[in-house]
């Protein structure tokens, strides 16, 4: 599928910056303090959820100062579209999860179906504890279950279409250094 790069550039030019790079850095610092306190002696496996979790996971784990194994899971529900569908697994865990603590890191908890399915998968695979960390939690009443929250959350974000810092607009701008909202959405 060909992409109109002028459109992609225009989207960024017109976007609203909701959080600057400095605000994202500060949020990751705070998340790291909590995770360092809670998981220091747990020998966890830390999974990034590809693709969106790549940036936050990479930057968060360098703030963690205890022994851990690191890997990735790949599950997608939006597939570069603006609304989510059925969860599609592209890569599952390579480690045995039996009796392990698992920390799942993703960019956003939106409706939460992705994280809920991943947590269930890890529990079914024998993990003794599954914790979740997200940079963003989108504020609305469409969560997979009422009151759903990650164990560690960086920033609450308004109910708009978001991109930057791992989140994409039609596959682009995951590299944007900050959190942006699409004009009119
Ligand atoms: O809370 P939910 O409504 O389930 O949405 C959150 C998920 O959606 C995005 O992934 P996406 O499916 O877009 O794949 P990507 O990570 O490759 O962008 C994001 O990275 C989360 O994993
Ligand atoms: O607001 C969003 N932006 C990009 N990807 C997403 N995946 C879930 N919600 C979003």
Image (tube, rainbow, N blue to C red):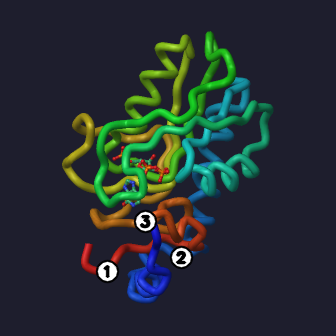
Disc number lying in front (1 or 2): 1
Residue pictured at 47% horizontal, 33% vertical: 89
Judging by the rendered image, the residue that carries numbered circle 3 is: 170
Q: Earlier in the sequence, mark 2 or mark 3?
A: 2
Within-10-Å neighbours for mark 2: few <14, some 14–19, many 20+: few
Residue pictured at 31% horizontal, 65% vertical: 158
Disc number lying in front (1 or 3): 3
Disc number lying in front (2 or 3): 3
Within-10-Å neighbours for mark 3: few <14, some 14–19, many 20+: some
As rendered, which of 86 and 134 lies closer to the eye? 86
**Residue 96, position in %: x, y?**
66, 15
As drawn, is 126 to the left or to the right of 33? Answer: left
As drawn, is 58 to the left or to the right of 146? Answer: right
Cβ of mark 1 under 8 A from ligand 2: no
Contact flag, marks 1 and 3 (Cβ < 8 Å): no
**Residue 167, position in %: x, y?**
48, 61
Q: Quick check: 132 above or below 19?
A: above
Judging by the rendered image, the residue that carries numbered circle 1 is: 183
What is the CA distance from the residue labelled 1 to the residue labelled 2? 17 Å
Q: Earlier in the sequence, mark 1 or mark 3?
A: 3
**Residue 155, position in %: x, y?**
45, 59
Residue pictured at 62% horizontal, 51% vertical: 54
Query: Where, quadrant-wise, is the N terminus in this rendering?
Result: bottom left
What is the CA distance from the residue labelled 1 to the residue labelled 3? 14 Å
Q: Quick check: 156 above or below 92?
A: below
The quarter of the displayed image where residue 159 is located: bottom left
Contact flag, marks 2 and 3 (Cβ < 8 Å): no
Judging by the rendered image, the residue that carries numbered circle 2 is: 20
């Amino acid at each position: 599928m060909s992409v109109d790069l002028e459109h992609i550039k225009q989207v960024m030019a017109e976007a609203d910056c909701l959080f600057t790079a400095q605000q994202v850095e500060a949020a990751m610092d705070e998340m790291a303090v909590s995770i360092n306190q809670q998981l220091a002696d747990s020998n966890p496996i830390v999974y990034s959820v590809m693709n969106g979790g790549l940036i936050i996971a990479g930057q968060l784990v360098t703030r963690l100062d205890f022994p851990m194994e690191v890997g990735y899971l790949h599950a997608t529900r939006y597939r570069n579209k603006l609304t989510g569908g059925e969860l599609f697994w592209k890569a599952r865990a390579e480690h045995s999860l039996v009796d392990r603590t698992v920390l799942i890191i993703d960019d956003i908890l939106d409706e939460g179906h992705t994280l809920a399915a991943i947590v269930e998968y890890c529990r079914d695979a024998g993990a003794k504890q599954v914790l979740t960390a997200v940079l963003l939690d989108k504020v609305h009443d469409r969560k997979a279950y009422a009151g759903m929250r990650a164990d560690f959350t960086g920033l609450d974000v308004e109910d708009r279409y978001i991109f930057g810092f791992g989140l994409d607009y039609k596959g682009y701008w995951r590299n944007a250094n900050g959190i942006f909202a699409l004009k009119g959405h």
